[in-house]
Image (cartoon, rainbow, N blue to C red):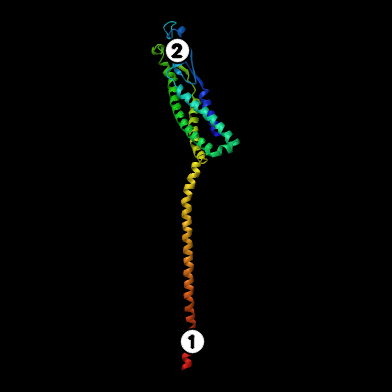
Amino acid sequence: ICQILFAIFAFATCGGYSGGLRLSVDCVNKTESNLSIDIVFAYPFRLHQVTFEVPTCEGKERQKLALIGDSSSSAEFFVTVAVFAFLYSLAATVVYIFFQNKYRENNRGPLIDFIVTVVFSFLWLVGSSAWAKGLSDVKVATDPKEVLLLMSACKQPSNKCMAIHSPVMSSLNTSVVFGFLNFILWAGNIWFVFKETGWHSSGQRYLSDPMEKHSSSYNQGGYNQDSYGSSSGYSQQASLGPSSDEFGQQPTGPTSFTNQI
């Protein structure tokens, strides 16, 4: 259930993102100025396809520009991993609840589950790392200061260029956090899935056999020691008996001596 929820948060915060920034170019000739230049971008962040027009402050001529960069591969890979992880977790939950007998049949279900869990753990690590780097590139490419450097009008000191507002990246930062949380969750789940496989039970049997042999040999040694102790005790009692008898016969010696006298 945690895997389902975390996967939803991961692809929803990334795949559903849409943001933008607003710039203003104030030319010396006010009629040529544009004080509200909106630049909108969204998932999958093919920024080189995001175009916008800005004034050149040289008459009515306008300059057509585009953002720099393309982070679509890392973003789409991240969302794809999240969607497939969600679908697999949902299917696995249904199998756990309603098809438990078939899941444990011939130990095939736990083995498949273990392999898939290991693969998804690796994919979450790779996808989250790649998307973290892609998000860093998106932040640089959509930085208003970097975008203003693309405009020829802003290179003239007589014109005033400024950023009205910057894009909000909080949801994208959240998607990266949930990506690494998914990796930790899936990696930690490897142990619990491994315990359901036959590899874990066979390993326990392999470890328990030498312990059983050691305990049985110890019991046999204890039995021999007990029997030896009982026999030695019996011998001591047997040897003690005659000594007590001899001790009881000692008074007869002096009595017979007196009688002789």
Task: Tell me what residue is drawn at x 46 percent, y 28 percent.
Answer: 127
Q: Is residue 55 above or below residue 119?
A: above
Three-letter code, disc 1: Thr
Tag 2: Cα neighbours inside 10 Å, few (<14), some, or many (≥20)? many
Q: CA distance from mark 1 to mark 2?
A: 138 Å
* In this rendering, position of residue 13 left or right of residue 130: right
Which residue reaches farthest right?
Answer: 98
Q: Mark 2 sits on what residue?
A: 25
- Residue 119 screen position, x and y as percent: 47, 32
Tag 1: Cα neighbours inside 10 Å, few (<14), some, or many (≥20)? few
Give the label on residue 252, or none: 1
Which of the pair 20/166 is nearer the observer? 20
Q: Is residue 87 above or below residue 233?
A: above
- Residue 2 screen position, x and y as percent: 55, 34
Q: Earlier in the sequence, mark 1 or mark 2?
A: 2
Q: Is residue 209 above or below residue 1?
A: below
